[in-house]
Image (tube, rainbow, N blue to C red):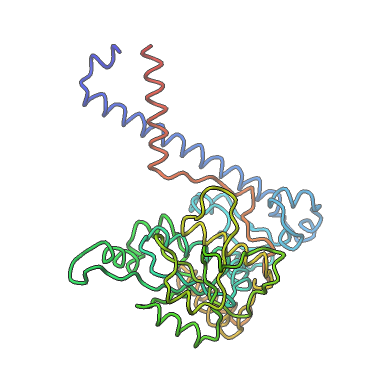
Amino acid sequence: VIVTAIRSEKQYLVHLKGKRHRREIEKQEKMRKLIEQEAKNYSEIFQNKDDSNANKLDAKTASSATGGGTAQDRALVDKISTDEVQKDGKTAGFDLGEDVDGVPRRIRRVETVLQRRTDRIVLLIEKSYDPHNQFACLRTAEAFGIQHVWFVDAPRINPNKKDFYQKVESVFHNMESSRQYSKIARSAPMWLTIRHFKSTQEAIKAVREDGRKLWVTDLSQEATALEENTSVKVPARFALVIGRETDGVSEEMLKAADLRVYLPMHGFADSLNLSVATALVIQKLFIMAPEMVGDFPAAIKKKLRKKWYNQVARTPAQKERYDPYITNPPTVFQDLRRPDALRKSFVRKKVFMKTDVATEAQHTSSSSS
């Protein structure tokens, strides 16, 4: 109370901001030291002078250091030095360094994802007008290994005026410069094959030309429940259609559907958010047909391998090093999760600052009382 009375309001805010900044630096320094120590411990276990000593590690020690996984994964642990972590603490561990057999872990990870990709299902979003949902669906599709995502773009109310739909179209087609792109979709679109259609009719035609069935999500009484014990079999090639936020799929799409499907629900709410419903339906389909994982044509896989390997190369030297693996890909991981020793939580700066301000305000209030 005395300090506040002496300083002007502006001076006090400047003082508080400086104090917050110092505390943030201290927290970041503590996190850096923690990562450095974890990497050092990790390195001491696996950076043995010779391969014979490395092979003598028992499974229990290796499992605890890598956070579990199969014996094959435990044998492919990174050699990550403290210097590497200091250079790039934000990616501490997963993409840095090499496996014990000399294969860049980044390349092995890319190959693992590629081997799990599926061409069997196409995710088709019809006339969604919410960029948040669109980006979230892209991230969901990529996480489940779905390569193809198609969109029937929402129509504009007035093509000659900058209305809401025009804004949405601008945001979506300029994903790289969109703040929502980085926050919601993360890097998902760069790994996906995305197509846009101006009308539902064009999308239906493309689905048929690609030799696919049409499965449409619907809440009507005509829809079939997606359950593990159902007699319905997942088609060899099909498109899963998700409708827009307000009224679902269009009548034109419903008429063209080979099957209408829905998720059984047991509460008062009879519908879900578009992106949430998409994730749940996709997960249910993979439970019903786990063989979809890795169902991908070899020719397309070969093209993607070349594209992705070049995509993850950040320097000409890395590109030159990764090129031989395009024709001679490495063996894959059985577990794509990060090693527990190199995981760290991430809190956005905005959220971090809010938390820090609240803590500071509480501390000031308790001091005053």
Q: Residue at x 29, y 26 (%)?
A: 15
180 or 40: nearer the viewer: 180
Q: Is residue 309 visible?
A: no
Which residue is most to the left? 160
- Residue 325 spot, x, y in % from top left: 60, 77
Rendered image quadrant of residue 54: bottom right
Q: Which quarter of the image is occupied by the C terminus?
A: top left
Q: Is residue 116 visible?
A: yes
193 or 25: nearer the viewer: 193
The answer to whether residue 170 is above or below residue 4 is below
289 or 229: nearer the viewer: 229
Using residue 231 as the reference point, say whether residue 119 is left or right of it: left
The answer to whether residue 19 is above or below residue 104 is above
- Residue 142 spot, x, y in % from top left: 53, 66
Q: Residue at x 47, y 65 (%)?
A: 138
Which residue is most to the bottom? 209
- Residue 85 spot, x, y in % from top left: 53, 51
Rendered image quadrant of residue 7: top left
The answer to whether residue 250 is above or below residue 274 is below
Q: Which quarter of the image is occupied by the N terminus?
A: top left
How many numbered badges does the structure rendering display? Answer: 0
Rendered image quadrant of residue 119: bottom right
- Residue 303 spot, x, y in % from top left: 53, 82
Using residue 179 as the reference point, say whether residue 228 is left or right of it: right
Using residue 116 as the reference point, say whether residue 86 is left or right of it: left
